Amino acid sequence: MAMRQTPLTCSGHTRPVVDLAFSGITPYGYFLISACKDGKPMLRQGDTGDWIGTFLGHKGAVWGATLNTDATKAATAAADFTAKVWDAVSGDEVLTLAHKHIVKTVTFTQDSNCLLTAGNDKLLRIYDLSNPEAAPLEIAGHTSAIKKALWCNNDKQILSAADDKTIRLWDRSSMEEVKTLTFDTSVSSMEYVADGEILVITYGKTIAFYNALSLDLIKTVEAPAPINSASLHPEKDFFVAGGEDFKLYKFDYSTKEELESYKGHFGPVHCVRFSPDGELYASGSEDGTLRLWQTAVGKTYGLWKCVLPEDLGAENSEQMYTLAPEIKA
């Protein structure tokens, strides 16, 4: 009997949601931050989507947002030519880092001591957060705006994706380019999976998996529509992707077979990420909402409650678990 996927809808944003990120698992659960063109990044409880707070201070669209591993710090990248660091517990702004152009991406080192930023001025910047007055280290090389920059290889290297149709691997200590991948079209997203050193990228209708250290291709999968974002499950059993046709797709990682597709958003999907425990994935859309989707439909988890078939009346027997059709978290 087929299970019906019922996503949790997280409303509150007033413009398209363009980026999202999960924290690691903390003693208080895990957390989710969203970046939105409304300029007001939001923090939520990761497993339920419950709103915790909004970080107020940017004067333009927020293009990137991230949490450190233990969810004590947040960082945001915005169109007001700044990146900001926040206390994710109190919501207070800790630092404003001025840039010369729109900032698109921010990411902490594992120890939370450094912040990597990049954006439309084509430079990678590394800020020492213990000495924020010091000028950042700058790495040049891209010839167009940088969309995403990530630490990899235990923070010894950096991966960056830009509108110049390249992904580049950089050595942190020498600040030199190690290797470049060139594509026929601009890369739309990039995810780094530390366990196994896998790089997940999307361009056009293609989802591609690379070894993050060598940049050797592992496999590619073609989706039915242009894809804006993809995420690999922590156990690497499957991956999800979303894009221009408003749908979320789930594929088997080993066989590349499409397993499921769901339509829940009312606009293109801009970002999708698995939770750190792999129990759900979150999507952010042009429609201004985030939605949380169960990895194993019908399992009791978060706000989802499993109901066994014998507990249901005959008229309800096709629905295996209960949840109001439109949960507003």
Image: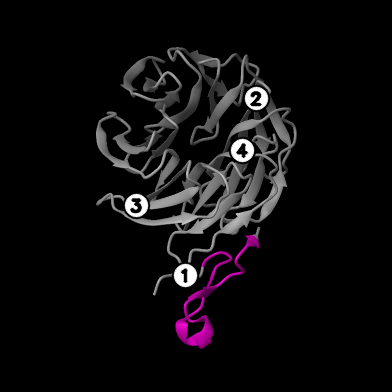
The 10 Å Cα crowd at callout 3, few under 14, some 14 to 19, many 20 or more, is many
Q: Earlier in the sequence, mark 3 or mark 4?
A: 4
| Tag of residue 251 | 3
Q: Looking at the image, which residue is at 47% across and 50% down?
A: 247
Vertically, is 79 above or below 252?
A: above
Rounded to the nearest whole Å, what is the CA distance between mark 4 and mark 1? 29 Å
Residue at the disc numbered 2? 79
User: In the image, residue 19 lies at what x, y percent?
Assistant: 56, 38
Residues at circles 4 and 1 in contact by the CB criterion of under 8 Å = no
Residue at the disc numbered 1? 298
Residue 47 in magenta stretch: no
Q: Amino acid at mark 2?
A: Ala
User: In the image, residue 216 lies at what x, y percent?
Assistant: 25, 31
Q: Earlier in the sequence, mark 2 or mark 4?
A: 4
| Tag of residue 35 | 4
What residue span does the magenta drawing correspond to? 301-327
Foreground label between 3 and 2: 3
Q: Looking at the image, which residue is at 34% across and 23% down?
A: 184
